[in-house]
Amino acid sequence: MKFIKATQLKDKPDATKLKFGQLFTDYMLEMNYENGQWGEPVISPYHDLVLAPESMILHYGQGIFEGAKAFRNDEGKIILFRLMDNLKRLNLSAERMCMPQMDTDKVMGYILELIDIERDWVPSSPETSLYLRPTMIATEKAVGVHASNSYKFFVILSPVGPYINGFNNPAKIYVEDTYTRAAVGGTGEAKCVGNYAGSILAAHKAKAKGYNEVLWLDAKDRQYIEEVGAMNVMFVVDGEIITPTLTGSILRGITRDSIIKMMRDIGYTVREERININDLIKWYDEGRVTEMFGCGTAAVVSPVGTLTYKDKVCVFNNGKSGPVARVAFDRLDDIRKLRVPDKYGWITVLGK
Ligand SMILES: *Cc1c(COP(=O)(O)O)cnc(C)c1O
């Protein structure tokens, strides 16, 4: 590992006023791939990237990323949550996008070194954390569609507060019936840059109508619920939690997986199944749907207050955040801050 020291460090922000993804720390990690192998990792002062205008990422979109978080717990320890799972998913995304694999153990070590250097940037106020953005882009200088022969991997860090509304401000969601996010056989399971580019117009139009995000339906039948924005989604029906089963076009969320496991362990029934929007509306009319929430690393657990499908408006829990979402949020927070023992092997404590 090469380390280049900064001549001057930035002032740390007021942790109670943090927004999401606006501010980056003093250092970043970089590693380049050339001639079939990854080179030496470098930690150096945060800087702009210099790319030739023909760099392949700019034209053909071979770009993938991850989102993970480091937390500071009540005792001041710095804790990484399921970072290895993020790196494994980065490799799955790389495979789908015809990009090179990484050695997850080594990369995990490099990222821990970076966070150790930046440990003073990990905030401690409630709902704050240090967000990690590992990214890989195609850097070959050539026009013409093919797999790039060179890549850059980098990791930047951002101290963050709540993502969209925060837990106590449930979202208004619009069921998107014109645009789709992903189709089976496409790239929906990969965290690749193009997926987000393709989703922006729908979100933009929904926001103009006063909604926070869209709910995506499947691309084939336009009936099955997939995700909300860039989050997985869960419903509480007859007191049980149901979430769309992974069909190939849904992102395999680590938060989703964590909530399924945790909630089963504390006695909830959690079912993964295909959920038809028309069935959901029928259950709602029968008074059986009591909560809806999104889940993801950035937003954590994000309660939904209203869901609008064509002319129909469903209101969950009187538009307030619900008790099951609260349990999921608290349980996740307890594990990530080691207030309860980590029986899942999800936690890495820095410096131990
Ligand atoms: C990242 C992401 C999620 C959430 O995944 P986590 O691993 O829980 O952060 C869900 N859907 C999409 C489309 C995503 O990009």
Image (cartoon, rainbow, N blue to C red):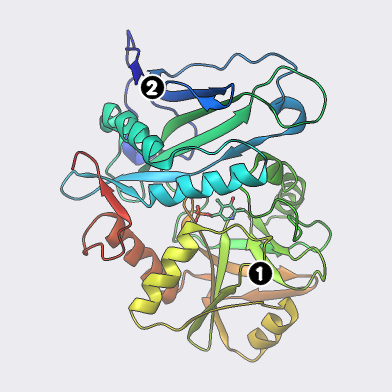
The mark found on residue 343 in the picture is none
For the point 23% across and 57% down, which residue is it? Answer: 338
**Is residue 155 placed above or below 222 in the rendered structure?**
above
Residue 35 appears at what percent x and percent y? 59, 21
Q: On the image, numbered disc 1 is attached to which residue?
A: 307
Question: Which residue extends farthest bottom?
Answer: 286
**Where in the figure is residue 51, as x and y percent of width and height?**
64, 15
What x and y, as percent, mark residue 29? 42, 25
Which secondary structure lies at badge 2?
strand
Along the polypeptide, which appears first: circle 2 or circle 1? Answer: 2
Between 214 and 111, which is closer to the camera in this rendering?
Answer: 111
Residue 16 vertical position relative to residue 155 in the rendered view, above or below:
below
Q: Quadrant of the N terminus?
A: top left
Q: Quadrant of residue 247?
A: bottom right
Q: Residue furthest left?
A: 75
Identified at 37% across, 34% down, the residue is 111
- Label 1 SS: strand
Q: Do the numbered discs 2 and 1 sit on residues whose CB atoms are within 8 Å?
A: no
Q: Residues within 10 Å of mark 2 (few under 14, many from 20)?
A: many
In the drawing, does residue 241 fall left or right of residue 1? Answer: right
Query: Whole-Å distance between the Cαs marked 2 and 1?
Result: 41 Å
Which quadrant: the C terminus? top left
Residue designated by label 2: 27
Q: Is residue 256 left or right of residue 2?
A: right
Neighbourhood count class around disc 1 (C-alpha, 10 Å): few under 14, some 14–19, many 20 upward:
many
Q: Name the amino acid, label 1.
A: Leu
